[in-house]
Image (tube, rainbow, N blue to C red):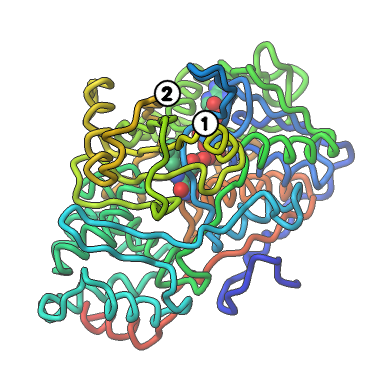
Amino acid sequence: MSRPADVHDPSAEEVPPAPPVAPRTARAPEAAVVGGGIAGLAAACGLAERGVRVTVFEREESPGGRLRGWDTTLADGSRAAMDRGFHAFFRQYYNLRGLLRRADPALDALVPLADYPLVHRDGPRDRFSGLPATPPWNALALAATSPSFPLRDLARVNVPAALQLLDVDVPGVYERLDHVSARDLLAAVRFPPTARHLAFEVFTRSFFAPVDRLSAAELAVMFHLYFLGSSEGLVFDVPRAPFPEALWQPLVRYLAGLDVKVRTGAPVERVEPGSGRRFSLPGHGEFDAVVLAADVPGLRTLVAASPGLGDAAWRAWAARLESAPPFLVSRYWLDRPVRPHRPAFLGTAGYPTLDNVSVLERYRDREREWADRTGGSVVELHAYALPEGCDPDRERDRLWAQAVSVYPELAAAAVVDARHELRTDCPLFAPGSHRDRPGTATPDPFLVVAGDHVRTDLPVALMERAAASGLLAANALLSRWGLPGHTLWTVPRRGRLAPARALARLSRGG
Ligand SMILES: Cc1cc2nc3c(=O)[nH]c(=O)nc-3n(C[C@H](O)[C@H](O)[C@H](O)COP(=O)(O)OP(=O)(O)OC[C@H]3O[C@@H](n4cnc5c(N)ncnc54)[C@H](O)[C@@H]3O)c2cc1C
């Protein structure tokens, strides 16, 4: 098969669909997709493109899930766009980009961010731009040029432990490392403290988890996906317009062309056995199959309210699914600009809660217009892994205070208006949680699950895991109906450096 436009890495792998397990169905099946985030929309595309009649039910007033957006009126009377915050669209997100390309073939909606600097509270700065794209040269160049890797500290690195990060094979890495926490792996590796903060804790916190609550296997997979296993580079694109306009309205139009109905403001309360078809979604009709593409809190609630779904073990799994700690996204419309050299996106490390600062007028049209018109700036702050039950006002204030210490000019700015989103709807990948994390399949062959919490046995994460799991869920149903599935693409499933893998195995005594 010819390579999709986004797959530049010669080592990227094609994942063909399994052959159909049943003869081709005589009539077009009808499927319900619960959840209109990336996973649900990917599943809807995958099914509708093969002739399945699909209805997507989304609880909120618009699709997009955690990338949903809405309009808001600011104190100065301007209409502004609000959403759940900055998202990085990495080049190795092959399946997500393939999904978006269905409605936007040239991916005009995305713009590249020229630089991805990281700053530590104690001073060192790193950047991932300008590095060679291909492993191991990217890692060697980072270590050689970065102030976070002083030579004397590098001599202390525990090489056998560090090699575990190079010997990633999915799913084997979970057997070796899932029981360990990211904190313990990082401690064993003995990377210089500044490098740990900058290069590693920034990664773990992007999973919304503190280092002691994230599986070391997930950290290793993340390193592999973004850095050591892919030659697409650690640079990313961002939508140039608010998410609805850039991403979801075009995709929903594409889906409408396939006769997919996207019902918003339509929560699914329960799934029951149907009388005419296999499943009934009370108030919404009956369907031959259901894709559960809800977020973790939504899935837990839905399964608890649907006692006939799956079997006891599967239901117990759903009940045990954990959410990551709360996170806060604060967006400020300010009366004056930040200094001209401030980058569009800055990762931060070593601060109590501040994880990144973005300046929206650097890359988004709508905010650029506002900033040009008012002479102000639109600044967004993220704080991941906050304490459970934290006080929202206190967290907002201390997040702002940290941002002022990074960009001192913020102290003089007057806030025209601000919006804050404190949420707890990202999944947690706790140490030891992989073993009983089910994939897209459930005990019922016509009930499948998709979302960024689902096990895919591919080296994917976050938005790309959502997109990949949506397509895998669609493939599982298509196979039951004797219909052809979709090919997925992934960064290589094994570490690219055979000698490093061999050394890692030797050091484990294997
Ligand atoms: C602040 C922030 C920053 C992020 N940054 C990045 C990033 O830079 N890069 C990256 O790759 N990822 C990032 N992520 C993660 C990314 O947003 C998620 O991985 C992805 O959006 C998950 O998609 P999903 O479809 O699995 O779930 P969701 O987007 O959560 O979609 C699930 C949908 O199901 C709906 N739903 C739930 N229950 C029901 C019900 N009963 N009936 C109907 N509908 C229901 C919900 O309303 C929701 O719309 C970030 C997330 C956040 C919050």
Mark 1 is surrounded, within 10 Å at the Cα level, by few (under 14), some (14 to 19) or many (20 or more) other residues, namely: some
Cβ of mark 1 under 8 A from ligand 1 = no
Q: 482 or 418, which lies in front?
A: 418
Cβ of mark 2 under 8 A from ligand 1 = no
Q: How far separated are the C-alphas under marks 1 and 2?
A: 10 Å
* Residue 416: image tag: 2
Left or right side of 325 for 102: right
Left or right side of 110 for 297: left
Residue 71 coordinates in the image, percent (x, y): 59, 23
* Residue 126: image tag: none
Q: 454 or 184, which lies in front?
A: 184
Q: Looking at the picture, does residue 193 appear above or below residue 68? A: below
Could you tell me which residue is drawn at 34 percent across and 80 percent down?
141
Could you tell me which residue is drawn at 73 percent across and 54 percent down?
485
Mark 2 is surrounded, within 10 Å at the Cα level, by few (under 14), some (14 to 19) or many (20 or more) other residues, namely: some
Q: Earlier in the sequence, mark 1 or mark 2?
A: 1
For label 1, the SS is helix
Residue 368 coordinates in the image, percent (x, y): 56, 40
Q: Amino acid at mark 2?
A: Val
Q: 298 or 231, which lies in front?
A: 231
Q: Looking at the picture, does residue 198 appear above or below residue 435? A: below
Q: Which residue is mark 1?
A: 374
Q: Residue furthest bottom?
A: 499
Q: Amino acid at mark 1?
A: Thr
Could you tell me which residue is drawn at 56 percent across and 26 percent down?
80
Q: Tell whether label 2 touches label 1 (CB within 8 Å).
A: yes
Locate the C terminus by quadrant. Answer: bottom left
Residue 44 coordinates in the image, percent (x, y): 71, 39
Q: Is residue 443 visible?
A: no
Q: 470 or 201, which lies in front?
A: 201
Q: Quadrant of residue 167?
A: bottom left
Q: Looking at the picture, does residue 452 appear above or below residue 311? A: below
